Structures are given as C-alpha cells and as structure tokens.
C-alpha cells in the first residue's frame, strides 16, 4: 500500500516532478533504429516523460530529437521537409537543424542574423545496439553512454522491440520485479514457447510452484532471487536484476537468448514496453530472430505498420476462454507480453496503490518503490546522482543456476551476475 | 463499438471503481531477534500502526521447540516493550503474518523457535536483515544463512527506514 501522495510522487514523470527529474538523469531508449532507417527519412513523433518531441536523421546521418512544434507559429514539424541538413517547416519555410537551432527564416535577410536567435529545445540522440537513446536532463550533467550488455554486443547477437502499453510505467515495471506471478500467469508458455522450451531448469519451475524469495540491494538497484528445491542439497535459483529506474532482466533458460525490459514513460498514462533479447557469445539464429519478429517469447505481434500490439484493449486482447479452460494459457490471453500488459492495463491508467493488499512475497516491489522515492528525494534535496546512472551499474546479468543450500546467492552467483565480454550466460 | 476493456481502462471509468474497503485489519507480529534490532523495533513501534504488535526479545525454557518432536514441553515468551511476556505460540496463532528482524552479524538463531511456531499454525514468516554500521558482507551472509531455511521472503533492508516502509506497505 502507498499513501495517495506517495502514489502521485512515484508515478508522475512530467517536467519538474521529482520522479521526472530522476528519469532525466539517465539515458533512456527513445526509438528503435529502424524507425529512422536512412538519411533524410521521414521524421517521427516521439513523446517521452510527458514532452512532445520529434526525431529525425538529417542528410548527413546526424540524429536529432527536438521540440515537435515550429518556433514561428507552432505547427507540428512532423509535416516538415527533411532535406539539406535540416527540417523545414512547410508553413512558412523556417528551417531547423538536429540541435533545434533555427538556420533559416526565409522572410528575413540572412545577414540580419535573425535565425541565430531562434532555437528549439533539443536533446541528444545516440545510436547503440539498434536503439536510439536520449538524455533529457541538464546538459552539464550528461552521463557516459549506456553499457547494458544487450546494446554493446555485435548487432547480429541482439534484437530489441517495443510495444505501446496504455498505463503508467510503474505498474508495468513492477510486473518485471514481481517474480511470483510467473508460476501463475505464464505457466502455460514455459513448455510451448520456442524461446523458452526445452531448458533443463524448466522442470524445477514446474515441480515447485511456490518459490521462496530473497531481495538484496545492488549498486544500481536490486537483485531478486527466487529459489526452488532441486536435487542433492541444492536450490535452483532464478535471479532477476533491476537497474534503476526501469531496467529488468528475466533469468535465462538453457542456451536461449537472454531477455528483459525497460518501461519508459510516454506520459503518466502510457509507456513504451521495450523488450531486448540477446546472446552474449553467439549470433542469434534465423529461427530465433524470426520467432522474435513473429511475437514469440517476450515480443508481440503488431497491428501492421504500428507498434501497437495486435491483441489490445480494443479487441479485449483476443481473450480465448476455451484456451483458458483447457490450460493452454492461464489467463486466456496469448503470449507472455500481452498476458502481462492486459492485466497491467486493467489496473487503470494509474494503479491506485492505496487499495492494494501486499504480502511478504511482494517485498521486491516494496523495495523498488522505496529506493525510487528515496533516490528522487536525495536528488531533489541534495543533488545526489541516483544509482543506475553510472554505466558500471549496467553491467549486470540475470542468471539461473544451482547452488548449495547454505550459499548466499549474491556470493554463489557473484560471477554469474556480471556481464563479461565473450563469456556465456550462466543458465540451466 | 468500443470494447469493454477499452472503456474500463479509461481515466474516467477509473473514477467508478468502488471505494468500499477490501480488507480487514491484520495482526502482524514483529519480532526482534537480537539487541540491535530490538532498538529498531522499539523505535518503529512508536509510530501509529493498524494491528501490529512489536516484541523486542524472546525467552524460553526447556529444550526443543513447539511443533518439533517433544516440543510441547517448550515454553517460549515474547517480551514486549512494556515488559509483558506473551506466550509465543498463542501470539503466532492469533497473527496473520510474522516478521522477524535481525541486525547483520548478530546472533539470529532464535528464529528457529519462532519458525516452529509459525509452522505449527501455518503462518508465513518474513525475514529482514538490517545493515549495521561497519557490518561486513560476511556478516550479512551469516544472518541470511540463519534465516534462509525458515522464511518465505528474506530481505536485506536498504536501511533502518525500510522497516517502516515495508510494514506500512503491508498495512501492519
Ligand atoms: S492475484 Fe495478484 S492481482 Fe489478483
Ligand atoms: Fe510477466
């Protein structure tokens, strides 16, 4: 349970809000590289942290993320012409470069220098691992580039997708930390999904439906361990890292690519659910990439030409009661991503946490909220740089492994939890 | 026509969510396992709570423990801040869930007696290890080892303030 004022505090990310300021300390995924595929391609509207922006790639491949609206009379520059190293407003021909600098005001003589006085707000946009990242905070405090392993391995080893999720970012992110739902909501998919099935560890999941949890802090966030009984005085551990504010890693299965999410606020009622999938030491196979494109694993099928899931709230998520009854899916909704999203959207645009009844096993969620609020407060009051900004904090890995029963997972999995170039993930 | 899922997820429909209470007061028992955590429990207990009771120590006589073989003979008491000694098994029996707190590196072995009582009455046990100034990673590991066999959820608290945050979140 949260008090009403805490619920507002931790869910609102617009400009000037404490949590919004926290988000503005980090590089966050803004678009997929495929959305700006070539120089002078059409610009793309982007809304992030309750700010309407426009992304484009200019004639020389430079990337820009600028205020969506023309400084002249406020029309959307989405209608603009992306040509000759700038975006020209089609209304009266004002032209802007990737930094938002106005470079031409046709009605004024060039020598007048009028254009130099006009500049739209802009944020840096960088390309890394098939993702375009932005930093929306104070330019003087811009951190080093993100180092999450999925965005540093060669491009043929990594695949990312995103989907629109129509609810506040926090309730979606909490789903990534709440390991206890997996044995219920996703139980049908373990044995059937091409990106999960066949792992030796799956048998422990199926045999022991009430895992026991341990939550410990890490430098960048949390480590959430779920353990189940295994043979020979051992436990089967599945360890989920959370890096503040919004990165989570799903523990791996066998040699399948490893995956996880970011939940990036669009505004307080919508977010982008980002899903990455990569292998640390080998290229993804064609079959794997095809499965990801087909919406298997944690990815989804789209309404063609959009990043809106094909199963969405307008069609009741293609609810299939027969599959539910037969146990092919637990909730009647198909696919892991939409199983989560359908339930999280049903919580409402912003989950009312004043009415929830948490139990002991919700401690991962409780601690994540606590750390977020504490970090936002320390930032607002003392300017403390929050955990997860330092790229060293990004070099964590999810892990699935067997450990002796008297071993603390943080020690036993110490090596497994660090991303190391050229070293395979630890997984059973 | 708009699907009901699309309609019910709007902000406007959120205002029609009914506001009747959906839970009753729960009796949490919060038990310190050592002297350092007793100070924390003492402090936290002064805040306003719903149905939680706080205990700063455990004392017992005889061997064995309740629920264990021959454990009937065991007498264990939880001592509260006012100096009352309450019967452990009765307290656990009347609880909804039990939280034990230990400070990193302190002797937390009393947990096994509390865990036996929880097992006897099928109550879930949450373990909280709070950091202590200067406590090493090994000390934390040792505390976790004491608690691990008995708890459904084991947490290394980020700080003393987490005790309050967690109990509030659980409506204790
Ligand atoms: S059982 Fe967890 S939300 Fe309903
Ligand atoms: Fe899920």
Image (tube, coloured by chain):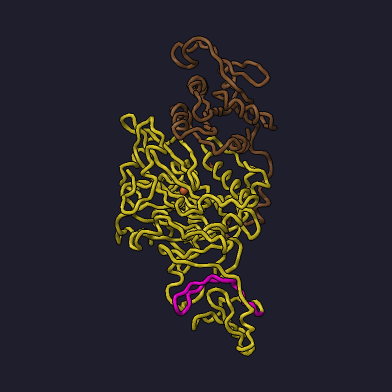
Chain colours: A yellow, B brown
Question: Residue A194 in the image: x percent, y percent?
Answer: 33, 53
Residue that appears at 48% across and 38% down: A215
Q: As rendered, which of A95 and A248 lies closer to the eye?
A: A95
Q: Per the image, is A328 magenta?
A: no
Residue A308 visible within the image: yes
Image quadrant where one finds the C terminus of chain A: top left
Residue that lies at the very extreme toward the front in this rendered image: B134
Question: Which quadrant is home to the N terminus of chain A?
Answer: top right
The residue nearer to you, when weighing A394 against B99, is A394
Residue A389: horizontal and vertical position, in percent?
51, 54
Q: Between A189 and B126, which is closer to the camera in this rendering?
A: B126
Residue A23 against residue A36 in the figure, above or below: above
**Viewer-closest of B133 and A30:** B133
Compared across the picture, whether A340 is left or right of A379 comes to left
Q: How many marks?
A: 0
Q: Answer with the quarter of the image where residue A108 lies.
A: bottom right
Query: Looking at the image, which residue is at 63% across and 84% down?
Result: A113
**Residue A306 image offset from top left, x and y in percent:** 48, 67
Residue B7 in view in this figure: no
Left or right, B18 with respect to A291, comes to right
Compared to B132, does A371 lie above or below? below
Give ligand 1's quarter of the image.
top right
Instruction: Give the residues in magenta.
Output: A54-72
For this view, does A9 lie left or right of residue B109? right
Residue A66 on the magenta segment = yes
Q: Quadrant of residue B28?
A: top right
Residue A387, given in percent of the width and then of the height, sits at 52, 49
Q: Residue at x 53, y 62 (%)?
A: A135
- A98 lies above or below B63: below
């Amino acid at each position: 349970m949260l008090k009403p004022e805490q619920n507002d505090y931790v869910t609102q990310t617009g400009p000037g809000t404490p949590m919004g300021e926290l988000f503005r300390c980090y590089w966050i995924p803004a678009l997929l590289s495929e959305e700006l595929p070539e120089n002078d391609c059409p610009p793309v509207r982007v809304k992030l942290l309750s700010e309407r922006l426009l992304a484009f790639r200019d004639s020389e491949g430079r990337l820009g993320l600028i205020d969506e609206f023309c400084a002249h009379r406020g029309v959307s520059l989405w209608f603009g012409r992306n040509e000759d190293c700038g975006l020209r407003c089609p209304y009266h021909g004002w032209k802007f470069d990737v930094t938002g600098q106005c470079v031409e005001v046709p009605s004024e003589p060039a020598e007048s220098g009028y254009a130099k006085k006009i500049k739209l707000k802009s944020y840096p946009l960088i390309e890394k691992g098939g993702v375009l990242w932005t930093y929306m905070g104070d330019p003087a405090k811009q951190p080093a580039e993100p180092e999450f392993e999925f965005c540093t391995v060669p491009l043929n080893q990594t695949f990312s997708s995103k989907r629109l999720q129509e609810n506040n970012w926090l309730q979606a992110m909490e789903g990534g930390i709440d390991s206890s739902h997996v044995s219920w909501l996703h139980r049908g998919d373990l044995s059937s999904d091409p990106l999960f099935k066949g792992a030796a560890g799956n048998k422990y999941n199926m045999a022991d439906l009430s895992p026991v949890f341990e939550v410990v802090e890490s430098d960048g966030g949390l480590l959430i361990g779920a353990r189940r009984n295994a043979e020979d005085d051992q436990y089967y551990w599945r360890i989920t890292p959370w890096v503040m504010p919004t990165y989570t890693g799903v523990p791996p299965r066998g040699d399948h690519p490893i995956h996880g999410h970011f939940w990036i606020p669009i505004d307080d009622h919508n977010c982008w659910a980002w899903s990455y999938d990569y292998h640390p030491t080998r290229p993804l196979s064609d079959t794997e990439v095809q499965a990801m494109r087909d919406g298997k694993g944690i990815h989804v099928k789209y309404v063609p030409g959009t990043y809106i899931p094909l199963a969405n709230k307008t069609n009741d998520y293609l609810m299939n009661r027969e599959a539910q009854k037969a146990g092919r899916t637990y909730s009647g909704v198909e696919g892991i991503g939409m199983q989560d999203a359908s339930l999280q959207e049903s919580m409402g645009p912003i989950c009312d946490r004043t009415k929830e009844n948490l139990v002991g096993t919700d401690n991962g969620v409780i601690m994540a909220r606590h750390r977020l609020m504490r970090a936002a407060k320390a930032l607002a009051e003392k300017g403390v740089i929050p955990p997860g900004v330092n790229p060293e904090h990004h070099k964590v890995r999810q892990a699935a492994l067997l450990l002796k029963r008297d071993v603390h997972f943080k020690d036993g999995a110490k090596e497994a939890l660090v991303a190391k170039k050229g070293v395979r993930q630890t997984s059973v | 026509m708009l699907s009901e899922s699309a309609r019910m997820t709007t902000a406007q429909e959120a205002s029609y969510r009914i506001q009747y209470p959906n839970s009753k007061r729960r009796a949490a028992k919060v038990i310190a396992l050592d002297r350092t955590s007793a100070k924390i429990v003492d402090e936290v207990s002064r805040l306003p709570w719903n149905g939680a009771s706080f205990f700063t120590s455990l004392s017992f006589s005889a061997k064995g423990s309740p629920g264990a073989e021959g454990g009937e003979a065991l007498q264990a008491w939880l001592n509260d801040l006012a100096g009352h000694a309450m019967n452990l098994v009765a307290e656990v029996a009347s609880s909804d869930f039990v939280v034990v707190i230990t400070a990193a590196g302190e002797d937390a072995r009393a947990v096994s007696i509390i865990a036996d009582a929880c097992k006897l009455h099928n109550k879930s046990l949450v373990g909280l290890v709070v950091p202590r100034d200067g406590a090493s990673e090994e000390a934390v590991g040792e505390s976790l080892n004491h608690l691990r066999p008995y708890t459904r959820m084991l947490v290394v608290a980020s700080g003393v303030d987490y005790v309050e945050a967690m109990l509030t979140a659980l409506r204790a």
